[in-house]
Image (tube, helix red, strand yellow):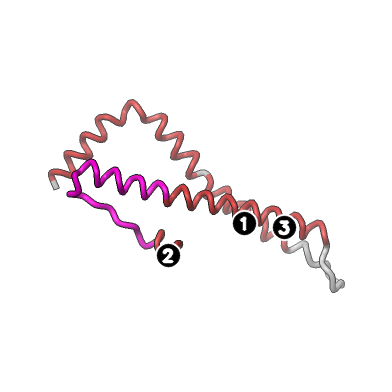
């Protein structure tokens, strides 16, 4: 336990100079999640306009817009997922290296579920 506290103390003492850089990077990476969610919701709303009442065919332009917004939502969600996985992988290695293997991190249930 002392090793963890010593590591966290040393980490926090050196982090002040990089605080703005870290906050900006984390904010930029985490803002992708609500953007992907909003685009997925927009895709749902647009998909409601693809079927015309009283007709057996679908409308072409709403279908095109639905495809484009769905593709963008999937692309941004994939980028957000990759950022999450890379961040966990990098932090896992950094913590192991800094503590000389005394503290190890493991993949959580959420990342494992998304991978499988």
Other-residue count near label 1 (Cα within 10 Å), few / some / many at <14 / 14–19 / ≥20: many
Residue where numbered disc 1 is placed = 40
Residue at left offset 18%, top offset 42%: 5
Asked if residue 64 lies left or right of residue 1, the reply is right
Question: Of label 2 and label 3, which has the lower sequence position?
Answer: 3
- Label 2 residue SS: helix
Residue 79 to residue 51: above or below: above
Residue where numbered disc 3 is placed = 66
Residue at left offset 67%, top offset 61%: 44
- Image location of residue 72, percent across then percent down: 64, 51
Residue sitting farthest toward the right: 55
Other-residue count near label 3 (Cα within 10 Å), few / some / many at <14 / 14–19 / ≥20: many
- The numbered mark at residue 115 is none
Residue where numbered disc 2 is placed = 113
Question: Of label 3 and label 1, which has the lower sequence position?
Answer: 1
Name the residue nearer the viewer: 96 or 84: 96
Question: Of label 2 and label 1, which has the lower sequence position?
Answer: 1
- Image location of residue 40, percent across then percent down: 62, 56
Query: How far apart, in angstroms, are the residues tagged by discs 3 and 1?
Result: 10 Å
Q: Which residues are magenta?
A: 86-109
Residue 44 to residue 75: above or below: below
Residue 56 to residue 103: above or below: below
Residue at left offset 45%, top offset 62%: 114
For marks 2 and 3, give the one nearer the viewer.
2
Query: How far apart, in angstroms, are the residues tagged by discs 2 and 1?
Result: 20 Å
Other-residue count near label 2 (Cα within 10 Å), few / some / many at <14 / 14–19 / ≥20: few
Residue sitting farthest toward the top: 17
- Image location of residue 100, percent across then percent down: 19, 44
């Amino acid at each position: 336990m002392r090793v963890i506290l010593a590591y966290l103390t040393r980490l926090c003492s050196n982090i002040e100079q990089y605080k703005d850089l870290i906050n900006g990077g984390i904010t930029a990476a985490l803002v992708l999640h609500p953007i992907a969610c909003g685009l997925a919701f927009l895709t749902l709303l647009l998909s409601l306009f693809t079927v015309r009442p009283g007709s057996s065919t679908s409308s072409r332009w709403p279908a095109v817009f639905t495809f484009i917004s769905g593709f963008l939502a999937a692309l941004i969600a994939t980028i957000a997922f990759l950022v999450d996985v890379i961040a966990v992988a990098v932090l896992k290695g950094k913590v192991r290296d800094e503590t000389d293997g005394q503290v190890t991190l493991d993949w959580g249930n959420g990342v494992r579920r998304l991978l499988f």
